[in-house]
Amino acid sequence: METGWNADRGRDQQQRNRHDGLEPRRAHGRSDSDWNLRGCDEDGGAQRAGTRATELMPQTVARERRRTSRRRRQEQARHYAWKLDGMPIAGATNSNAIDTTALSLGAHTVEVTVTGTCGAVTKTAALNVQESTTATELLPQTVCQGATANFTTTASGTGPFTYAWKLDGASIPGTGNSNAIDTTSLSLGAHTVEVTVTGTCGTVTKTAALNVQENTAVADLTPQTVCQGANAAFTGVASGTGPFSYVWKLDDVVIPGEAASMVTIPTGSLSLGAHMVTVEVSGTCGNATKSATLTVQENTSTTDLTPQTVCQGTSSAFSTTASGTGPFTYQWKLDGAELPGETSNNVSINTGSLSTGNHTVEVIVTGTCGAATETTTLKINPNPIAQAGSDQAQCQNDQGANTFNLNGTVQFGTGLWSVVDTTGSADAVIVTPSDPDTAVNVTGVGSVTLRLTVTSDQEPGCGTATNEVTLSVQPIPDATISASATVCDIVAGNSASVPTAGPGATYVWTIENGTIDTGQGTRAITWTSGVPGLTKLTVVITSQEGCTATGTKEIPVEDCPTDLSIVKTGSSPIAYENTNFTYTLTVTNNGPGGAANVLVTDTLPAGVPLVSVSTSQGNCTGTTTITCNLGLVPAATTVTITIVVKIPVGAICTEICNIASVTTTDNDTNLSNNEAQLCTYVDRQPPGPGMNVPGNSQVSDDKSGSVLVFPFYTSDPTRPVNVNSRINITNIDETRSVCAHLFFVDGASCTVADQFVCLTPNQTTSFLLSDIDPGVNGYLIAVQVDCDTGCPVNYNSLIGDAYVKTSTGHSGNYGAETIAADPCIVTPCTTDSFTAELRFDGSRYNKLPLVLAVSNIPSRADGNDTLLVVDRIGGNTMVGMLPLGSVFGLLYDDVEKAYSFTYTTEECQLRASLGNTFPRTVPRFDTVIPAGRSGWMKFWTQEQGGIFGIAINENPASAGGPGAFGGARSLHVLTLANSVTLTIPVFPPSC
């Protein structure tokens, strides 16, 4: 250990001590040795202070500690010389650290001599070296949990001493050199005990291990319940600190030789009931005892079963009583097979399905302590059996009694026959009543019921058994035939019958000189007579019982006159070209006599080919003239002949007539109905099921025709997306191509431009007016023409519609107004023609509208804007269409009040929104049709010309308002113009 001294003091103190003269100064807090004297040096300068040093401070240190001593004052050029116990030691500065390791304990003297410019000074101090603190080691401890562990240490060195104890790093009570630690709450296993001893000369720490061991314990024994004779095993699971030793006891008596953790106790010699089993376990850390109950239970047993003898079909009851330790379950067996569902201590066995003889009945009783089995015998005696044999039936013996031979069977007893019932006039005599195979004689007609009774011969007896048999004697059927006394030749519907032979009887009829028509197999038939002479009927009747009778009857057949008729009908009132048409010929014999060698002849119209022919009787031959040989046609019968022909192409607008006749070699008393004629009009083939729309029907936008009128189109080439029209034209003909000559009429100038469209069968075409006639407001007329010559044709196969979007926001879709041509009248036109005149007079073409109407005109005050477009049709397309001229009309409000108006224009198209400007009424339009109201109007031209038109309503709220609507619609036609003509140029189509 080192200790240090310092013999210097700071310069600040030196400066504070400077003054002029030799006045002595005393350093603050210092002894006389600290005084400094000032004098002059040899240079006459200020005098320097004399050399001095601060006192060395005495030191008391522990060995090995270093200590430093400093002087309080320090000046330049000072020299320090240090001594320990008078001996020089290292050190040349104002401080020194002395290592005390090698010094002896006790007092020592430290000396320092400071030499400076003005002299030398020596200072001394005492150094006392004391002994360092030590302590003895703690001894390790191993204790059982709950015991006290004592730890002790002995301190040495320089006191006084203090003690600080810790357990597992945590401070614990105790300030002395020993400590008793309670281990009750400590965990099992290793712990660390630590003591820190602090003395005058330092601190020392000692540690030791504390091992806490587990106390001896044993797990609970499991109570045991066993059947007497079984072994009971107990296990004592010890815990704690071993090794362990075991002592087992039964009812407080030590079980010899049982020193392991497990014991097996045989219970054969133990009494029934509860016993106490105890285990005592000893270990390093104490003893533990546990006990458990051993319950010895009684083994299962049961009482004997009683044997039984019963008749087959009766029930047999068995029971047993179980003893021992319950609960008990029961399983009954019959001949080794388990009886399902029989789980009680008694059972009832139905012997109906069991064989006769001995059977084994067994019961197995299972309890808590094992099972017990008992068996016995069940004997089943057979019941008597009586079998009388099958019922028998015979047809009545006309020679006397009917004899039946019985074949009865008797088993397990004795038998006896008896009569128990009779029906009708039947009576019976049993030849040998005690013989199962006796004969029985039955007289009369009816049935006899015999009973065979068998009495049991078993012990004990099993009663009687009976069985019956019925013997029937059936009458012979009556085969007398009832029929007309005479009949006409070849007449159907004649009747014949015999009396019924009862259910299940069969009837087989045969005829000579005739045919059986209906009823074969029954008692009544209808038949057709043959040629004049005799018809012989025969019937064989077999009753259900097999009794047979045969009857015959001959009926005279007279030669009677006949009356044949023929009727012809067609498959429809109108025939269509290029389709099949069916003729139906109905030949009827009105009687009274039949007709022989009946022949039907039908000559088909010229140019009409045969497809097929069939007949319900006979056969038919020929192609242009059909001949059907029907043979015999009885009176009151009908023969149907079906002839299918193909109507040729080009037969339209013609009438085809067909005549058929019927003949017979017999005497036909009425020849006026032997011929039939049918004439049928031929029309073009309809486009679908049903009939064609009549060609003279009124002009409409929902039919097909030969002229289409599109009342309005518009386009703007600068805004084709917003202002445009699309025209759609369709050819509905399934076989012919058609061409349409299109005339585009400028609504303002009435000038006409044309174009062709060529359509194959079933083809449709569409085009935009911005591509065909841009920038024009007008209407379009499409005329169906011949694709080779350009002449008008009357195929009536055009339909069309248009979509329109205007610059004013009106838009909609409307159907083209269709004008049909008379399919049988062709407009005069040849290859040499330059023009053709279309006459809309109701003969060649439909008449055109004269008076038009607009229904349900909504109010402008509700956001509606109705655009009205009216066109005049007529004139010469090569010069220009005729103008509308003067228009007169009536506007009606919703209370039927009319307001007239007029309008005059030289244009051929009127296009205006309905409002206060047009039509000019008094009062104005908005007054006539105010908000929330509607009206209608009708109008016509003063020139009585044909006109068409549409109305397009626009309402911005139509997309969201429930009462707002928009779109285009055709105008209603109220009257027709008498005659309107339109002249068109004729030249071959360019497509």
Image (cartoon, rainbow, N blue to C red):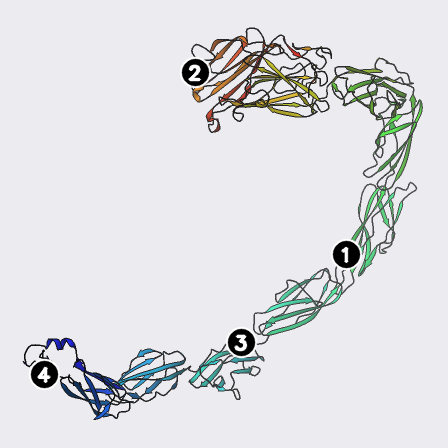
- Find the distance from the CA under tag 3 to the CA under tag 4: 111 Å
* Front disc: 3 or 1: 3
Mark sitting earlier along the chain (3/4): 4
Residue 68 seen by the camera: no
- Find the distance from the CA under tag 1 to the CA under tag 4: 165 Å
Residue 512's spot in the image, x, y percent? 93, 29
> As drawn, is 192 to the left or to the right of 805?
left
Mark sitting earlier along the chain (1/4): 4
> As drawn, is 107 to the left or to the right of 367?
left
Q: Are marks 2 and 3 in contact (CB under 8 Å)?
A: no
> As drawn, is 332 to the left or to the right of 596?
left
What label sits on residue 225 in the rendered view?
Answer: 3
* Front disc: 1 or 4: 4
Classify residue 289 by image quadrant. Answer: bottom left
Q: Are marks 2 and 1 in contact (CB under 8 Å)?
A: no
**Residue that mark 4 sits on:** 35
**Residue that mark 2 sits on:** 926
What label sits on residue 465 in the rendered view?
Answer: 1
- Find the distance from the CA under tag 3 to the CA under tag 1: 60 Å
Mark sitting earlier along the chain (2/3): 3
What label sits on residue 214 in the rendered view?
Answer: none
